[in-house]
Amino acid sequence: MHPILTDSQPRHHIVFPYNDEEKAINAVFLFANSGLSKQESVVLIMEDSHRKPIEGRLAAAGLDLAALRASGRLNCLSANSLLNVFVRAGVFDEAVFKETLTRAIVQAMGDSPVRKVRVFGELVSLLLAAGEPELAVRLEQSWNELIDSQSISLFCTYRLLDSKYDVLPDTLVHLHTHRLTPDCERLEHELE
């Protein structure tokens, strides 16, 4: 994995389109574990099917997830449930998105001894998988506004496996500052 996951800085917006579930779980683990070890808070917005494997990796590394949750330094949210709140009848409610996630980020920042927050999200991956690339673009644009206003780092994964996409569309790639390649050996800087 590339050091951008372990040394992520505020205002980094990293994307990882993947075909290998294990590499994706490992990437999320590295991103979250590194932040937690540096006293940062971590907000994980995961697909329901990924929650158990991601939390399992963190627990296997010796992290006390219950204590981290109680301290406010770890917040695990359902991407599936949140997407149903943010998108209704094919319409993205940007105000609800920003209000909900700003509240979670501000709380996490207050709970971090170093006042830094890392966020992992799979909302956009769910939209792309549902055949909604325009909504995914709009959501990424809203994320960029939150990244700037809250000075967070955001790591997004996009599952290409079993989707109609072989590669991530350029309209989505260019909304990120950094892109991990599917083989995770290289990092491409898109906007720096």
Image (spheres, rainbow, N blue to C red):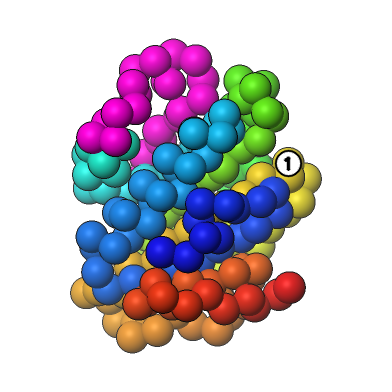
- In this image, 162 relative to 147: left or right? left
**Residue occupying image coordinates x 57% and y 78%:** 188
Residue 163, how many percent across, how many down?
28, 76
Q: Is residue 39 visible?
A: yes
Residue 9, how many percent across, how many down?
66, 51
114 or 139, which is in the foreground? 114
**Residue occupying image coordinates x 61% and y 60%:** 13
Give above or below for 62 relative to 183: above
Quadrant in which residue 68 is drawn = top left
**Residue occupying image coordinates x 76% and y 51%:** 148
Query: Where, quadrant-wise, is the N terminus in this rendering?
Result: bottom left
- In this image, 188 relative to 62: left or right? right
Based on the picture, tell me whether residue 152 belongs to the magenta stretch: no
Give above or below for 124 relative to 115: below
Helix, strand or loop for disc 1: helix
Based on the picture, tell me whether residue 63 belongs to the magenta stretch: yes
Labels in figure, total: 1
**What kind of residue is marked 1?**
Gln
**Residue occupying image coordinates x 23% and y 60%:** 22
Residue 172, how many percent across, how many down?
55, 74
Question: Which residue has dot 1 on it?
Answer: 150
Query: Where, quadrant-wise, is the C terminus in this rendering?
Result: bottom right
Q: Is residue 90 visible?
A: no
**Mark 1 neighbour class, 10 Å CA radius: few under 14, some 14 to 19, many 20 or more:** some
Quadrant in which residue 89 is drawn = bottom left
Give above or below for 111 relative to 131: above
Q: Which residues are magenta?
A: 59-83
Residue 25, how many percent across, how many down?
30, 54
